[in-house]
Image (tube, grey):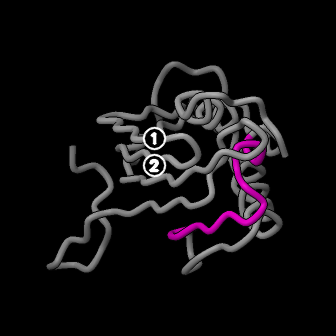
Amino acid sequence: MTNGTSFVQDVLETYKRAVYESDVEKFLSIYSADVHIYDCWGNWECKGLSLWKKSVTEWFNGLKEDGYVLQVDMNDLVIEENTNVAFAHCAVTYSAFRGNSEEKDRQMTNRFTFGLKKENESWLITHEHSSLPIDMQTGKGIFNVK
């Protein structure tokens, strides 16, 4: 898939818009066919766009069924790139709103690292890793450290 993203920042903006719109095809357009993802809700990893599409479709369908819209914010963003390879890391906050409500129902923040490569003059995510710090007392993820 070629998405016309000539800047890494464009990829991240497309990510945010696609999540907000629950648009599977727009979301997948920023990923390489051989994407490798760590921490994909209940799975150790996800290899390849077809498996990622299955997970993303379930995620977005679940949001729609529950009547949620997600707003994505990326904070403390750092982007490093050269001609054909780039990486970005940031804190990604997902805020859930019911329908058109301006009242936030819930939110969580994850740490993300994105590895990107340039294909056909467009940046695509080839590796993604999200994580949470773990509370050593309970063994549970800490969702809102910041």
Q: Nearer the viewer, mark 1 or mark 2?
A: 1
Q: Earlier in the sequence, mark 1 or mark 2?
A: 1
| The one of 41 and 39 positioned closer to us in this rendering | 39
Quadrant in the rendering for residue 106 = top left
Do residues under tags 1 and 2 come within 8 Å of each other at their CB atoms? yes
Q: Residue at x 38, y 47 (%)?
A: 89
Q: Residue at x 73, y 39 (%)?
A: 22
Place of residue 74 in the rendered image (x, y in percent of width and height, measured from the top left)? 41, 35
Q: Residue at x 67, y 63 (%)?
A: 35
Q: Which residue is mark 2?
A: 87
| The one of 15 and 88 positioned closer to us in this rendering | 88
Q: Label 2 amino acid? A: Phe
Q: Which residue is mark 1?
A: 81
Place of residue 17 in the rendered image (x, y in percent of width and height, measured from the top left)? 65, 29
Q: How many marks?
A: 2
Q: Label 1 amino acid? A: Glu
Q: Is residue 59 left or right of residue 77?
A: right
Give the answer, above or below, for where 2 lies relative to 85: above
Q: Which residues are magenta?
A: 27-40
Give the answer, above or below, for where 71 lies relative to 129: above
Considering the numbered disc 2 on the image, is that residue within a helix, a strand or a loop? strand
Place of residue 15 in the rendered image (x, y in percent of width and height, measured from the top left)? 62, 37
Q: Is residue 75 left or right of residue 4?
A: left
Q: Residue at x 15, y 79 (%)?
A: 137
Question: Is residue 66 on the magenta stretch?
Answer: no
Give the answer, above or below, for where 127 lies relative to 3: below
The C terminus sits in image quarter: top left
Check disc 2: other Cα within 10 Å, few if <14, some if 14-19, many if 20+: some
Considering the numbered disc 1 on the image, is that residue within a helix, a strand or a loop? strand
